[in-house]
Image (cartoon, rainbow, N blue to C red):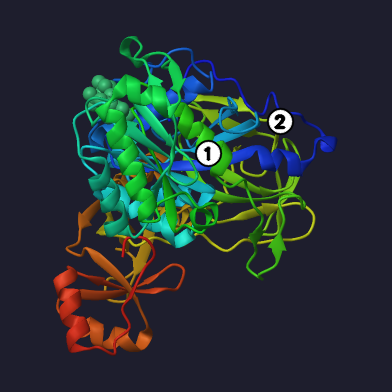
Amino acid sequence: VTEIDQPTTASGEAPRGPGSGVAVEAAKRRTFAVISHPDAGKSTLTEALALHAQMISQAGAVHGKAGRKSTVSDWMEMEKARGISVSSTALQFNYRSAGTYSEPTDCVINLVDTPGHADFSEDTYRVLTAGDCAVMLIDSAKGLEPQTLKLFQVCKHRGIPIITVMNKWDRPGRSVLELLDEIGERIGLVPTPLFLPVGIAGDFKGILRRGTDGEPAEYIKFTRTAGGATIAPEVHLDPEKALATEGEDWETAAEESELLSATGQDHDPQRFLAGETSPVLFASAMLNFGVRQLLDTLVDLAPPPRGRDDINEQHREVTDDFSAVVFKVQAGMDTAHRDRIAFMRIVSGEFERGMVVTHAQTGRPFTTKYAQTMFGRDRSTVESAYPGDVVGLVNATALAPGHTLYTGKAVEYPPIPQFAPEHFAVLRATSAGKYKQFRKAIDQLDSEGVVQVLRNDVRGDASPVLAAVGPMQFEVVTARMTTEFSVETQFDRLPYTLARRTDAESAVELNRQRGIEVFTRTDGALLALISDKWRLQFIQKEFPKLTLEPLVATA
Ligand code: G4P
């Protein structure tokens, strides 16, 4: 999510006060994240959504924004120059379902941003834990790409429902059935299109809406607008008129629909919510084709926020007292203030700015005077918020990802899993005599979840190993070491590419092996770092009894 002009806060318009009912507010909310590979069109789609929600009057502000394809070294500068725009965390807007397919409903949509591109990191995974649903955005010419697959694994692990959007249908690409087959075959998610495109990729005329039994229900014909800057006008035609208008293109879409029904690929709400099937839409984010249908699908099909089980398996309902989970901590976003913002996703109850909540991990009170919601680089103070909403807490030094805040009955939610790192480096202080600061800084960055910190007796405390999901995390560490702790550091990459969870018994044998080294992570987990998958396969074959378990997400 990037700079979007003049945001209007959805929560500013929602009914408020204790009488308004947390249940009603929660039911209105849809909180989702977009998972995609760089360049699939996430920024363009975000902008198109904002356009449809009337947050902006014209698309194009985000297009070609400076630094989007920035290199590693630009990133820090970019963050400084652009405030929080590199990972602005959450975008909230009201959406009134136009009522074509459902009764009009006022909904509050929360789009949780997954920082993408070069800054792919553990944060990218963590923010997925803040959503109730994911939109898997695919470039129709490319199909499934690596980053999408990784993020999909996290969604699958959490069992969250996934809506698939085949984007860029205005450009030549692959065929409908080929793209759908790939989803079914490669990730085992049964694609159940709600709409099918009329016109092949590159000749996008409109969409066929499928009825419940796969029968063509209607044709929605789109008209291009200049530069795709405004909402594309739609004409709705019945199947007969559609045939008369589009001829063969309509017939093809209708046949595809029939074929999909024959193989059971019709939308099934229960299987969708169970994460077994995925409703599919075809769109052009650039031309704003199919974007309104995506919003309607979110409103009509995506689940509203639900309660959660805590670490003692006690269930907290959305209507219970306030509780929230911190899913991301960002430091130094605003150089003028040098602050630290913890982003929390509200699980239950009503949040009111200024209320004093309890930090479950320390048992200490925490005042929320400076609660904020974020819109691109703009921050605005939030007065109240409800389950599903994301709120930023300023100067939240004690808070780390996975922490719980609550009022009333005590609750602590399970920690966010630590994801499988794929990049490893040794960190050393290069400034002499700064060992104490160095250790303190490492502990701080570790507790914030900036990187995972691994140690073993052989390497000792002066040269901990940093483990990351994306290499950019190392850059962040060294930069923050300099600016915040005045310790100059240097990292050297290690030749490992895989981590597996092991146990003390197996560690003895593993440490004897070439290309393997065992470490203890701060949470106590024993991790074996392995040079590559061939080495892993060899060890597993030679020593089948050793414990080598995949970690979450990218295993
Ligand atoms: P990302 O955030 O997922 O990385 O993707 P982004 O929206 O930046 O889009 C990547 C490129 O794909 C952009 O082109 C964008 O205009 C284009 N794009 C996005 N959606 C569509 C679509 O539906 N159809 C077509 N034809 N193109 C689309 P660019 O040339 O890299 O940048 P720009 O100069 O257009 O900003």
Residue 383, disc = 2
Q: Residue at x 51, y 37 (%)?
A: 297
Q: Look at the image and tell me in which quarter the N terminus lies.
A: top left
In terms of depth relative to the viewer, which is nearer, 465 or 486? 465
Which is nearer the N-term, disc 1 or disc 2? 1
Q: Is residue 285 visible?
A: no
Residue 279 sits above or below residue 527 on the image: above
Q: Residue at x 54, y 56 (%)?
A: 270
Q: Amino acid at mark 2?
A: Glu
Residue 321 sits above or below residue 204 on the image: below
In terms of depth relative to the viewer, which is nearer, 256 or 294? 256
Q: Is the residue marked by circle 1 packed among few (<14), some (14-19), or many (20+) residues within 10 Å?
A: many
Q: Residue at x 65, y 64 (%)?
A: 310
Callout 1 secondary element: helix
Residue 204 sits above or below residue 459 on the image: above
Callout 2 secondary element: loop
Q: Position of residue 123 (x, y in %)?
A: 42, 48
The reply to whether the residue tagged 2 has its Cβ within 8 angstroms of ligand 1 is no
Residue at numbered disc 1:
298
Q: Please state if 442 lies on the left or on the right of 337 as rendered.
A: left
Ligand 1 lies in quarter:
top left
Q: Amino acid at mark 1?
A: Leu
Quadrant in the picture for residue 80: top left
The reply to whether the residue tagged 1 has its Cβ within 8 angstroms of ligand 1 is no
Q: Is residue 235 visible?
A: yes
